[in-house]
Amino acid sequence: MRVAVIDYDKCNPDKCGHFLCARVCPVNRMGGEAIIIDEENYKPIIQEASCTGCGICVHKCPFNAITIVNLPEELDEDCVHRYGVNAFVLYRLPVVKKGTVVGILGPNGTGKTTAVRILSGEIIPNLCGFNDSWDNVIKAFRGNELQNYFEKLKNREIKTVVKPQYVDLIPKAVKGKVRDLLKRADQRGILDKLIKELELENVLDREIQHLSGGELQRVAIAAAMARDASFYFFDEPSSYLDIRQRLKAAKAIRRLAEEEKAVLVVEHDLAVLDYLSDIIHVVYGKPGAYGIFSMPKGTRVGINVFLNGYLPDENVRFRPYEIRFTKKSERKSQVGEVLVEYPDLVKDYGEFKLEVEGGELYKGEVVGIVGPNGIGKTTFVKMLAGVEEPTQGKVEWELEVSYKPQYIKADYEGTVFELLSKIDAAKLMSNFYKTELLNPLGIPDLYDRKVEELSGGELQRVAITACLLRDADLYLIDEPSAYLDVEQRLAVSRAIRHLMEKNEKTALVVEHDVLMIDYISDRLMVFEGEPGKHGRALKPMGMREGMNRFLANIGVTFRRDPETGRPRANKEGSVKDREQKEIGEYYYVET
Ligand code: ADP
Ligand code: ADP
Ligand code: SF4
Ligand code: SF4
C-alpha cells in the first residue's frame, strides 16, 4: 500500500519550474497519470493507485514537499482518518479505559492531537473514505474496545474535557479573573482542593492576561479537572512547570483515574509520563505524513520500546537507533579554562532577595540549573552579564550573554530565514553550523515559514537556534524542552553540548525534565529557597551531589532502568524510595 503526502504549505509550482514533479514522474512520462494537476487550486495531486513509489518526485522537488511511503497492506483496514487527498493519515487509536491513565508517547506530527480530537468527538473520523457518520464508525470498530465508546459518544452519553497543548493561547480566548474562570468550571465542587493542590492561591485574583506560562498551565489543568466528565484528555500537562509542580499535577491527574474516570495523557517528559501512566501507546510513523498507534503496553515496557525504536510484538523497527541514558564519563571541561570566577553576591529587590554562593564556570561546559520557577535564576545571570548591579559583592568583568527566555514570543514579521540571517548569515551558511545545529533541529525545513505562523514546538526550535547563533561568552537557555518531543529534546541537548565543547563557550541550561538535565549537564547549579521571596544559588557541583541535593529538597528518589539507563521516579514510600532516602542517594543508584 502506498501513501503519498504533499505538504501544500511548502509546494510552490511557480518556483520549481512549473510542476517539476509531474514533469519528471516516469509514469507521467510514459503517458500515465501518477501526478495530475488540479488547475483550479493550482497544485499537484498524486494518485496513489498509479504511483509506483520510485521516489523521483520526492528527490526532485526543491522544497521537500513530497513524502511517499510504502506501508503494509494490513494497515489499510486500520485506517482511521485522513485529512484529505495527499494529506496526513492516522492508523488505529488508543484505548480509553475507566479508572486508567493511558499515556501516549511519540514524535510531534504523528497524529496524537488528531486522535484526541476524534475521541473527544470534535471530528468524526472519515475512515479514510468519505464517511461522515458515527454509525459507520461504530460499524467499523465492531468488536473493538472502542465500539462501545463511540456508541456513547454518538448518543452524547459521554462528556469529554480537553486540556489543550498550547496554554499560551488561552489568554486570547478567555478573559477575566482566574477565580471567575475556575468557579465557572467547577461542576464537581472540588475547587478548593484543586487550588491548594496546584498552588493557585496567589493567582486567584489575577487577570488571565497577566499569568505566566506555568501559572496558565496549572489553571488550565485545574479547570479541566474541575469539570464533570467521564473522559479527560491532557495534552502536555508539564510544559512550563518546575519538577515539583509536575509531580503535583501528575498526582492530581492520577486521582481522576482513582475516581473511575478515563484519562488520556500526551506527554514528552518521560519521568512524568512514567509516573502518570498505567499503560502506554507508542505512536510512530513519519511526522506530517502518517502515524500508527501501537498496541497498549505496560508503562515500563512501553517507554523502553519507544527508546529501543523497535516494537517486538508487531516486529516493526521505527527508528534505526536506540536511545540510551548512560552515565557520562567525567568531561575534560571540568579541568578546562575558567570562564569566570564570581564571588558571593546578593541581590535585594525588597520583596525578593537572592544570595549567590561564589563559584566558577568553565569554558566548554554545560551547567544544568535546577530549582523552582521564580527563585532568581534569571537574576543571577543578569548580574553575571552586568545588566543588574548586585546589592552586595562586585562584578568586575563584562560577559556577553545570549539568552533564550522561558516564554518566547513570535513577534517578528518575516520568515525564519530572514530572522536567522539577520543574526548571523555566515553561520547559517557554514557547514559546521549546518551539521551541529541547523540540520539536527530541522531548521532548514522552516526557512520559508512566517515566524508568526509557527507552532509552539517550531518556534521553540527557532528560538534556541537564534540564541545559539549569536556570538557570546555565556548562553542562558531557559526551558528549551517546552513543546519539543523526546527526539527533539535529545537533538537540542546534543547541539548545545557540541557547540559549547567545540567553540569553548559556556551554557547554563534551566530545565525541569529530569532526563534532559541528566543528558545535557556536565555539572549542576542548585537553586533553593522560597519562590518569589528568597533564593539561594549554590555553587556549581558534580552531577551526583547536585541531583542528591536537589531531589532531597523535593523528597523524590530516582532509580535507573537497567535496560535503557533512564531515570525512573520511585513511588513515594516504596521499599526503594525508603532505602535510597536512608542512605541519602536520591539519584545515581544503579538497577
Ligand atoms: P501531533 O499531535 O502528534 O503533533 P497532530 O495530530 O497535531 O500531531 O497532526 C498530525 C499531522 O496532521 C500534522 O502533520 C498536521 O499537519 C496534520 N493536520 C492536522 N490537522 C490538519 C487539518 N485540519 N488538515 C490537514 N492536515 C492536518
Ligand atoms: P527565575 O528565573 O528563577 O524564574 P527570576 O530571577 O526571574 O526567577 O525572578 C526571581 C524573583 O525576583 C521573582 O519573584 C521576580 O518577580 C523578582 N524580580 C525579578 N526582577 C525584578 C525586578 N527588576 N524588580 C523586582 N523584582 C524582581
Ligand atoms: Fe513543484 Fe514540489 Fe510542488 Fe511538485 S510538489 S509542484 S515539484 S513544489
Ligand atoms: Fe511518480 Fe515516482 Fe513520484 Fe510516484 S514516486 S508520483 S511514480 S515520480
Image (cartoon, helix red, strand yellow):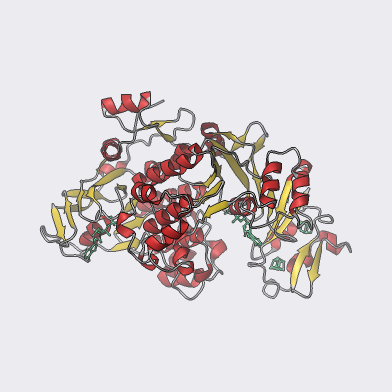
Image coordinates of residue 238 in percent, x first then y, are 43, 49
Q: Is residue 516 left or right of residue 370?
A: right
Q: Which of 151 and 12 is in front in this view?
A: 151
Image coordinates of residue 152 in percent, x first then y, are 67, 47
Q: Which residue lies furthest to the left in this view?
A: 392
Image coordinates of residue 145 in percent, x first then y, are 68, 38
Q: Residue drawn at (51%, 47%), measured in percent from left and top?
A: 487
Q: In this view, does 103 lie to the left or right of 196?
A: right
Q: In which quarter of the image is residue 387?
A: bottom left
Q: Nearer the viewer, residue 474 or 368?
A: 368
Image coordinates of residue 120 in percent, x first then y, are 61, 52
Q: In this view, does 121 lie to the left or right of 254?
A: right
Count numbered badges in the picture.
0
Q: Residue drawn at (16%, 49%), measured in percent from left and top?
A: 358
**Does residue 499 appear in the picture of this structure?**
yes
Q: Residue drawn at (31%, 41%), measured in percent from left and top?
A: 332
For the C terminus, the image quarter is top left
**Does residue 505 appear in the picture of this structure?**
no
Looking at the rendering, the quadrant in which ligand 2 lies is: bottom left
Q: Is residue 325 left or right of residue 347?
A: right
Q: Residue drawn at (68%, 34%), measured in percent from left and top?
A: 314
